[in-house]
Image (cartoon, rainbow, N blue to C red):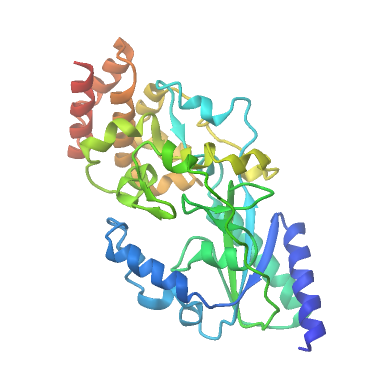
Amino acid sequence: MTTINRSQLAEQIRSWGRELGFQQVGIASVGLADDEARLDRWLNSGFHGEMDYMHKHGSKRSHPEELVPGTVRVISARMDYLPDEGEAPKELLTKPERAYVSRYALGRDYHKVIRKRLQKLADRIEAAAGPFGYRAFVDSAPVLEKPLARNAGLGWIGKHTNLINKDAGSWFFLGELLTDLPLPVDSPVGEHCGTCTACIEVCPTGAIVSPFELDARRCISYLTIELKGSIPEELRPGIGNRIYGCDDCQLFCPWNKFAEPTAEGDFTPRHGLADVQLVDLFAWTEDEWLERTEGSAIRRIGHERWLRNIAVALGNAPTTPVVVGALKSRADDPSEPVREHIAWALARHA
């Protein structure tokens, strides 16, 4: 490919990406030396908790060319997911009898949606440039997607460790095509958090231990999704009514005043999960749960962790006969972790 053809193809890739529903597409090289050092320090601090997969792949996470041999560029894409809701999500946090589900998990599983779009983008590239080497990833392999997206010009990594775009905030998913096409790269985006510490101050469990440093072991998203066993008792009150993930660091980030609701129908909330009572969710049988989480990212935690999380939220809810009755109805649950969290919750209402 000539230099002119490479530049033209890169511009076409950005255009095709927008046509396929991505809000932005950028191109980065594979160099991640500084980010590799930061990752090593984070792992050595034990901040990854039980997420052993964060280190088991060795250097592949920070060397895309080792993950997919022949890779010289990463095509990074972002897609908005914030649903258009009648009530601001922030208001749900003030209503402890209702469940809060991280907004990214309200609709269809983003892995499937974005992977299909990336495949369509790859098909268009192949039609224009001929056969080429690539693999698509959506939060599904050891890829440092946020540093790569930053290097591709999609945004900067904020103090809460999420990617922020100055025109669109942070409510978006990321996906990548690792490719052997020697395309021209975009310029990285510099950090624009300034002196703001809103995300650090608002974190309910103090998980952002310093700017740009997250202790996952204290993060509500980790506690309600990744952690398989018992949630540390000292952190349970801070979970509030959050039963799957947490959005506080995004809800209170000033840059998200620029965020627009997604037009992607697949991310429309399902089964009333955007506004539902905790006791109603706690009453779902496992069969009902399986039916209502089909095609959802929520499915990955299993019914047991789902009940565990809701038990904690019910322990944080106002004491009412309905709440206490819901907890008592499952006090003899077959799962020991569920029983333990219910016992804690009931003791809070004693």
In the rendered view of the protein, which quadrant contains the N terminus?
bottom right
Identified at 40% across, 49% down, the residue is 300
| Percent coordinates x, y for residue 139 in the rendering | 49, 60
| Percent coordinates x, y for residue 123 in the rendering | 70, 71
**In the shown orientation, is residue 218 left or right of residue 191?**
left
Q: Is residue 161 above or below residue 137?
A: above
Identified at 74% across, 69% down, the residue is 13
Q: Is residue 215 above or below residue 311?
A: below
**In the shown orientation, is residue 141 left or right of residue 344?**
right
Identified at 38% across, 51% down, the residue is 210
| Percent coordinates x, y for residue 206 in the rendering | 34, 42
| Percent coordinates x, y for residue 348 in the rendering | 22, 21
In the rendered view of the protein, which quadrant contains the C terminus?
top left
> How many marks on residues?
0
Asked whether residue 53 appears in the rendered view, the answer is no
Name the foreground residue: 302 vs 50. 50
Name the foreground residue: 148 vs 201. 201
Q: Residue pushed farthest top?
A: 321
The picture quadrant where one finds residue 181 is: bottom right
The picture quadrant where one finds residue 337 is: top left
Asked whether residue 347 appears in the rendered view, the answer is yes
Q: Residue pushed farthest front?
A: 195
